Every structure is written in structure tokens, then in C-alpha cells.
Image (tube, coloured by chain):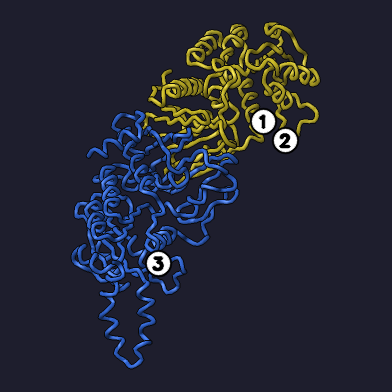
Chain colours: A yellow, B blue
């Protein structure tokens, strides 16, 4: 059994992941994931949603997870860490002590809120041979996974992905699409793969519409929705057909956690760090374009 | 004026049949015939003229498709467009089967009819063809694309106004029930955005989107309504994605498909939810299920509107909206030239108006 620590309780992921990994009573059986357990937690701090911590602490206590006051107190007691802070701007600092101690880290979305921070994390990861994995759970939604596995449609020529993209209440933390836009962006990258060289983002109060231009000539678009009702979905344009599909969220935590367990077992991130880095660069460029009335921006890593 | 023209043309027939003693008898069909609007066609190098004629002439035509008769056609074509050269002979033969007289000039068409459909596949040809019709004061429906440049579109509508003659033009996709039905779809609510897609082969004499892209841009306008302010465009050999911002902050996109099998549809975003649109020719989806076994309405949707238009003289799509739709495509061309820069519709429109 892999022993995991969990840091920063300002997101529901803390509770949701623990329920599934620790087989907490009352959790629907089909949601449970085996192979790792949360053995210790640190409620930590939050500049983005501090008011959520208290409630989640109560729940984590109920689940019987021992809590410590300082993140460093978990070192020596765990095989891996889940860095949960909802605020991507703090992930480098929050992960640092663990990486320096050689502890593998799953870093929740958004991985970072800049290419610079992402690079710093990977440098630290390489230096201390502590592997790092980050992904939105939407990458593992069954409709997305099934589509990617299906060879019948032929090569993907492009796609249009949509999903909710509410903005962070504090714009300098999880700016623009880093906050929730990361989810549909992750779907976009799961479908398209890496290689986007340029983006343009038309950003308005109710919506961001990003067009990405891949270096092989493929074009994909992303609609981040803030006004009106929306779930997730995509239309995939392939060489042999067009498929439109909604993307359900019913089992996405379970599917992500299976990958998290696999990551801690093997030490290999299920998503190539180069792709995660490009996703950060894509969002960085899209945000920049969005504040510049849709002017084209290079995706720079 | 229309009536005089139709009586003149009818007269020889009247004389033939009204010789028997009961002179009152043949007047019945003659009266009924007098109400029939005689339509002429200019341009026969694509299927649409035949499709409309078939619908109008069908003995089973419903009320909303009856009252029109296509009587004469001038088989205009364009020698430098492959499709035109290839298709023209086929459709001339087809029109003859519907007893449509084939004549040697547009003037001969205008002499015989109350209203005209300009059906040439070549948008470049329309300005001259349409102007002649407007000058003669005949209401005119123009098949897509209305023109091959925004400047021509502006001039056509200006001239129509000057001639005080009704005109209307659209792609048949506008009145496809699965598209127009998305404007007030119960699962979508008020439309907040739409991502439209469709096939977009290029034709060297038309700007990229004017040739086939116009179908889907028409769909975008059908679903979003007018009000687009600016566009940006990503363009490669595989696809184009044009993103338009409407003045109320809504955003609509058009994806031009050039690789892989094309399909014409959209995803529509609204106050109540998200739904795929129908596919061309078919009805609106319910809970995401797109009907394909319902009655095919491809040309019939717009045919009904043409009948209504010729009967009332009121165009179902305003000149302003059609002009904007072409400004959208022209701005998209400009954005491509400027490597994806934001281009305002009013800028390209001002340029076109100066020409």
C-alpha cells in the first residue's frame, strides 16, 4: 500500500480524493480506488479560498486522517504527496520541500499559472529525482479516453472543445483560463496532442473563444463559458468522420486517481511533462491574447 | 405591370382554347392561370434551378409551394469554372423535361416573366445578371453566393433600392429546419454563442469562404442573428476557423472543413443549455438526438420562402443582414491576409462602399 500525504484543504478535491482512496464508508462502491491511502494531511493555507478550509478539515477528521500543522511534518511519513491548493500560483512553493526531499508529487490543477513556474518545478523534480504529475481529471473522462482509443475515425484534423470557465475571484491568482479553463484545455490537448504554435483568444465577459494553430496545420478551438448553462463537450473533426459528444463528469475523479496510483507505483507520470508544460504555455498565450483583443500570440515554452 | 406581361404571354393559349361555344368554360383555368406567378431563371449550371422547379411544378405541391410556374430559362454558365462547364448541359436537359423554354438571352427571359431567380453558380456573374432584372422591375431571388465580393453585394442592394424592386438572397441552409429551429430551441434558450462547421472547398475565382463557406456563415447568422462587429481567422490548408464577436459580447465561430468528410451542423450555446444543431436538410434535435429520417427539407425550406417572397414582395432576409454576412466573410479574408489579425466589419464595409 502506497502511503500518501495531502496538502492544502481549500478545495473539495481533498475530501473527494480521500473518500475514494481511503474507501471511506458511505462512498459509492463503484467510485473507490485501490492501491494508495491518504495517511496524513496538512490543512495548510489559502489566499484564494481560505473560507473553505475549516469545513474540509472537519470532514477529513471524520475520515480519520491524522492532521499536522506544518507541511514539513509529513516528510518521512509518506511515499508520495498530493499538492492540492486550488491556487496554482503557490504550487511551486508548496511542492518544493517535498521535491527537495525526493518525494514524488501529484500536483493538482492548475499545475502552475506560468511557464516559468512549471519549468522551476520540473527542474527541481529532475535535480532531486522526484517525479511530478499533473492533470485535470477531464483528461480521463470516459468519452474522451474512448474517442482517443478509437482508430476508426482516422487521424484527427481538429476539434472544438467547450466547458465552463468561470474566473478566479482574485485575478492575479489562477488568471484567466488557468482557474477553470484548464479543464477544457486539458480535453483539447488530450484530443489534439502537443504541437500548438500559436493562439488567438477572443475574450469577453461571458466567454473566451481560443483558436489554436498546430504546427502541422491542424486547427482546434476552445470555448470557455461563463454565461449560460454548460457542461463539457467536444466535436472532433477526423479524416474519416465528425463526432460530437458531451463529456460527463460522473467518474472522472476515480479515473484520475487510478492514474495517480499508477504514477506513484511506477514513478512515471502518465502525461509527458512536455505536454503539461505546453498546456501551461497554451493558457499563458491565450490569456495574453485575450487581454489584447484576440491578437495572435506564440505558444512559448 | 407583371399582370400585363402575363396576360400577353397567356393570350395565344387563350385564343386556342376559347374557340368552342362555351366561352365561359376556359376562363376558369385562365383566371387561375392569371394568378400564377411566372418565373424565369437565369443561370442553369447547378442543380438548384431544377430543384426549385420540381418543387413548384409538383402536382402534389402544398399551398405554400404553389402558385409559381417556371416558364423560361437562360442557361448562363461560366467557362472558367469547372463545375459550371461540367454541369450546364445536364441541367438544361432537366429543365426541358419540366416544359421550361430555354432561350438565348436574359432579355428574352425578362420579357416573359413576373419574377426571376438568378441561379448562376458563379457569384461574379450576379451583379450584371441581377442589375438587368432589377432594371426591368422584376422581383428577384439570387442563389448563393449573392456575389463574389462585398463591393458587388453593396452595389446590388443599392441598385435594388434605386429601382424600388424587391430582392432577396440566401443559401438554402438558412431555412433548413435543424438550423433555423435552433434560434428558440427549448433546450438552448436564448442563443449566447454557436460553433458552426461545414465543408469549404476552394474555388479560384471566389474568396475562400464565398464559394461554399457561405452556406455555414449563413447558418451562423441564422442561429446568432446579425450584429457581428469583428472577426479573426486561423487559416491552414486543412481548415479555417473564423471567430466573430457580436456587439453584445456573444461569440460565434465558423470552422471550414477542407480535409475529411464534410458535415454541416453546429453546437449551440444558450441560457438554458448546450445542444448540437440538426444536420442540413433535417429537423432540430431533441436531447441531442439528431433526426435524419424525417422529411428532407434541403431546398424545400427556402423554396417556401421564395414563393412567399414572390407573392408578397417582402424579403425574408433583410439587405442589411445579407450585407453583414458578406462583410463577415470579407473581413475573414482580410484577417487571413493580415495573419489572423482582428478585422472590423465596418472597416471592410466602408472600403466596399467606396468602390
Q: Is residue A135 visible?
A: no
Q: Position of residue B216 (x, y in %)?
A: 40, 46
Q: Earlier in the sequence, mark 1 or mark 2?
A: 2
Q: Chain of mark 3?
A: B
Q: Chain of mark 1?
A: A
Q: Which residue is mark 2?
A: A30
- Name the image quarter holding the N terminus of chain B: bottom left
Q: Which residue is mark 1?
A: A254
Q: Residue furthest bottom?
A: B21
Quarter where residue A184 is shown? top right
**Residue at disc 1, secondary structure:** helix
Q: Position of residue B223 (x, y in %)?
A: 47, 45
Q: Which residue is mark 3?
A: B55
**Residue positioned 47% across, 42% down in the render:** B224
Crowd tier of the residue under label 3, counting other residues whose Cα lies within 10 Å: few below 14, some 14–19, many 20 or above: many
Q: Chain of mark 2?
A: A
Q: Nearer the viewer, residue A2 or A28?
A: A28
**Residue at disc 2, secondary structure:** helix
Q: Are marks 1 and 2 in contact (CB under 8 Å)?
A: yes
**Residue positioned 58% across, 39% down in the render:** B271
Q: Position of residue B87 (x, y in %)?
A: 27, 60
Residue under disc 3 on the same chain as residue under disc 2: no
Q: CA distance from mark 3 to mark 1?
A: 56 Å
Left or right: residue B32 compared with residue B17: right
Residue under disc 3 on the same chain as residue under disc 1: no
**Residue positioned 28% across, 81% down in the render:** B13
Q: Are marks 3 and 1 in contact (CB under 8 Å)?
A: no
Amino acid at each position: 500500500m502506497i502511503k500518501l500525504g495531502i496538502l492544502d484543504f481549500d478545495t473539495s478535491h481533498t475530501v473527494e480524493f480521500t473518500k475514494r482512496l481511503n474507501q471511506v464508508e458511505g462512498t459509492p462502491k463503484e467510485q473507490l480506488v485501490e492501491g494508495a491511502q491518504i495517511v496524513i494531511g496538512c490543512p495548510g493555507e489559502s489566499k484564494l479560498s481560505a473560507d473553505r478550509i475549516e469545513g474540509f478539515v472537519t470532514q477529513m477528521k471524520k475520515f480519520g486522517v491524522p492532521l499536522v500543522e506544518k507541511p514539513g511534518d509529513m516528510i518521512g511519513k509518506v511515499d508520495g504527496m498530493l499538492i492540492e491548493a486550488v491556487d496554482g500560483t503557490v504550487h511551486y512553493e508548496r511542492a518544493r520541500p517535498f521535491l527537495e526531499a525526493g518525494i514524488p508529487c501529484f500536483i493538482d490543477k492548475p499545475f502552475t499559472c506560468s511557464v516559468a513556474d512549471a519549468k522551476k518545478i520540473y527542474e527541481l523534480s529532475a535535480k532531486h529525482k522526484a517525479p511530478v504529475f499533473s492533470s485535470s481529471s477531464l483528461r480521463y473522462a470516459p468519452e474522451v479516453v474512448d474517442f482517443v482509443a478509437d482508430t476508426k475515425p482516422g487521424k484527427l484534423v481538429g476539434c472544438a472543445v467547450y466547458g465552463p470557465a468561470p474566473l478566479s475571484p482574485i485575478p492575479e491568482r489562477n488568471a484567466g483560463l488557468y482557474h477553470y479553463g484548464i479543464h477544457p484545455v486539458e480535453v483539447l490537448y488530450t484530443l489534439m496532442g502537443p504541437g500548438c504554435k500559436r493562439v488567438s483568444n477572443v475574450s469577453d465577459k461571458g466567454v473566451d473563444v481560443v483558436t489554436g494553430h498546430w504546427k502541422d496545420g491542424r486547427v482546434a478551438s476552445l470555448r470557455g463559458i461563463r454565461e449560460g448553462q454548460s457542461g463539457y463537450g467536444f466535436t472532433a473533426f477526423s479524416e474519416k468522420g465528425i463526432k460530437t459528444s458531451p463529456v460527463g463528469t460522473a467518474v472522472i475523479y476515480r479515473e484520475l486517481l487510478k492514474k495517480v496510483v499508477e504514477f506513484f507505483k511506477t514513478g512515471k507520470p502518465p502525461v509527458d511533462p512536455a505536454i503539461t508544460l505546453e498546456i501551461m504555455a497554451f493558457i499563458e498565450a491565450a490569456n495574453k491574447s485575450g487581454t489584447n483583443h484576440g491578437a495572435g500570440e506564440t505558444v512559448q515554452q | 405591370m407583371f399582370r400585363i406581361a402575363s396576360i400577353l404571354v397567356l393570350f395565344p393559349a387563350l385564343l386556342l382554347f376559347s374557340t368552342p361555344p362555351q366561352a365561359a368554360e376556359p376562363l376558369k383555368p385562365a383566371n387561375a392561370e392569371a394568378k400564377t406567378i411566372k418565373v424565369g431563371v437565369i443561370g442553369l449550371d447547378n442543380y438548384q434551378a431544377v430543384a426549385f422547379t420540381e418543387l413548384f411544378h409538383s402536382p402534389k405541391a402544398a399551398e405554400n409551394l404553389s402558385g409559381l410556374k417556371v416558364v423560361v430559362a437562360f442557361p448562363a454558365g461560366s467557362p472558367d469554372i469547372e463545375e459550371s462547364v461540367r454541369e450546364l448541359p445536364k441541367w438544361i436537359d432537366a429543365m426541358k423535361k419540366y416544359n421550361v423554354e430555354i432561350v438565348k438571352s436574359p432579355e428574352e427571359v425578362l420579357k416573359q416573366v413576373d419574377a426571376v431567380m438568378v441561379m448562376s453558380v458563379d457569384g461574379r456573374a450576379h451583379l450584371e445578371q441581377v442589375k438587368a432584372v432589377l432594371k426591368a422591375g422584376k422581383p428577384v431571388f439570387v442563389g448563393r453566393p449573392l456575389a463574389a465580393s462585398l463591393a458587388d453585394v453593396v452595389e446590388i442592394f443599392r441598385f435594388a433600392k434605386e429601382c424600388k424592386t424587391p430582392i432577396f438572397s440566401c443559401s438554402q441552409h438558412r431555412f433548413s429546419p435543424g438550423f433555423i429551429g435552433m434560434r428558440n430551441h427549448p433546450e438552448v434558450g436564448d442563443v449566447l454563442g454557436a460553433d458552426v462547421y461545414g465543408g469549404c472547398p476552394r474555388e479560384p475565382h471566389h474568396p475562400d469562404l464565398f464559394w461554399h463557406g457561405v452556406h455555414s456563415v449563413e447558418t451562423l447568422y441564422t442561429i446568432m442573428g446579425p450584429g457581428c462587429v469583428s472577426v479573426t481567422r486561423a487559416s491552414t490548408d486543412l481548415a479555417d476557423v473564423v471567430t466573430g464577436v457580436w456587439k453584445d459580447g456573444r461569440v460565434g465561430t465558423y470552422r471550414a472543413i477542407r480535409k475529411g468528410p464534410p458535415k454541416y451542423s453546429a453546437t449551440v450555446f444558450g441560457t438554458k443549455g448546450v445542444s448540437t444543431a440538426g444536420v442540413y436538410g433535417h429537423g432540430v434535435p431533441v436531447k441531442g438526438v439528431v433526426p435524419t429520417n424525417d422529411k428532407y427539407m434541403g431546398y424545400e425550406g427556402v423554396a417556401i420562402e421564395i414563393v412567399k417572397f414572390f407573392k408578397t414582395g417582402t424579403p425574408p432576409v433583410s439587405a442589411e443582414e445579407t450585407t453583414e454576412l458578406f462583410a463577415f466573410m470579407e473581413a475573414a479574408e482580410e484577417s487571413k491576409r493580415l495573419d489572423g489579425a482582428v478585422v472590423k466589419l465596418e472597416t471592410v464595409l466602408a472600403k466596399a462602399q467606396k468602390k
